[in-house]
Amino acid sequence: MGRELSAISTDESESGRDRDAELKERLDKYDYKERGNVVNCLLSCATRFPPEGKVSLVRDILGANSDKMLYDLYRNVYTALLVPMKTASRRGSVSSSPLPKRQRNAGLVASTINESQTRTRVFRDILLKRDDYRCVVSGCVDPEYHQQMGLPADVPDIKLEGAHIIPFSYGCWKGKGVPEDVANIWELLYRCFPGVRRAALTIGTINSPENGLSLTVLLHSAFGNFRIAFKETDIKHQYEVKSYGYLNYYERQMIPSNRLVTFRQAEGHKDIPLPDPVLLDCHYRIAEILHATGLAEVIDRDFDRWDEMRRAPNAAQLREDGSTDITRYLEAAFWWAPAQNDPTAV
């Protein structure tokens, strides 16, 4: 990642300053758009970001000279961090930071980005080798390995997938050049979670084993939707499986009764790194924010609304009688920019 990214400011010099009272007072005075979402989101992020990320966010909030700027800060966090994390296969419109300093940081990030990544079977294969061909949560064995090894019929087997901790969508896009949105989401990720930058996660290493887990299809979906997350315990490589919202019967059955899992490297594959605790902590903190604020449901609702509208028989057509709800279209379109830059766009 080099020297360029080391120049990104995370405002570490203010890490010891307690400004919680000032923060609450400023947010209490906010009286502009989406007051509930803005206050809940920024307060929850300030509470749950790691210390350096909190310092950076609080400084920006207190430095906002108007409610409009504060709203723009919220939009940046919402569209460039929470939405890309939550909607890994659907890229929405990203709002850049209103602060010139942050925009310069995004420019630094853009200068380090080379090319989009592609999904490969190698990612899954490496994870399965490291994890002994078992789901790291349920212990279920991959069917091909089960058959190959002639394991007893009472050893549970089920299809396994390689799950990215920081979504794979962070590392891929269509077209040549680097879209501005890509630089913006990485700049914000590094700013809010400086440990991710220090862990050397980049677009080029998005498929590294440190950024992956072997999970069943069901648990992969739950993990990607932030319905489960891994909270680090005091024991090295041991995590508590946290759950949010509704898990179906089969998902619940796959989680140990004590909710504790320990990650280990299989014999003969000690050279393959385990999942990076910093990346798992980032995922866990995002899960806490999404569900503490109710924004997980807000994001799903906004994207579902746009999907419904764009698939409707008369989608994007204005009625001659002037009865088209243009505001509804524009508001929904703001959340979904299907776009040429999104390789997963329909």
Image: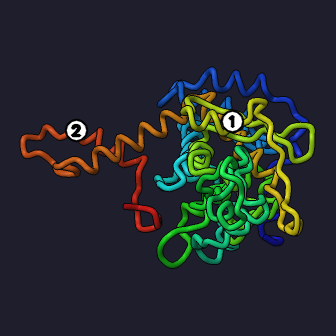
Q: Position of residue 327 (x, y in %)?
A: 29, 39
Residue drawn at x 71%, y 34% as measured from the top left: 242
Quarter of the image for residue 178 reads bottom right
- Tell me the SS state at disc 1: helix
Residue drawn at x 85%, y 29% as measured from the top left: 18
Q: On the picture, is 218 further left or further right than 346? A: right
Label 2 amino acid? Answer: Asp
Q: Position of residue 237 (x, y in %)?
A: 87, 47
Residues 140 and 175: in front is 140
Q: Which mark is residue 45?
A: 1
Residue drawn at x 70%, y 62% as measured from the top left: 150
Would you say the residues marked 2 and 1 are in contact, meaning their CB atoms lie under 8 Å apart?
no
Q: CA distance from mark 2 to mark 1?
A: 34 Å
- Crowd tier of the residue under label 1, counting other residues whose Cα lies within 10 Å: few below 14, some 14–19, many 20 or above: many
The residue lying furthest to the left in this view is: 321
Q: Position of residue 145 (x, y in %)?
A: 68, 64
Label 1 amino acid? Answer: Cys
Q: Position of residue 306 (x, y in %)?
A: 35, 45
- Crowd tier of the residue under label 2, counting other residues whose Cα lies within 10 Å: few below 14, some 14–19, many 20 or above: few
Q: Is residue 2 visible?
A: yes
Q: Which residue is mark 2?
A: 325
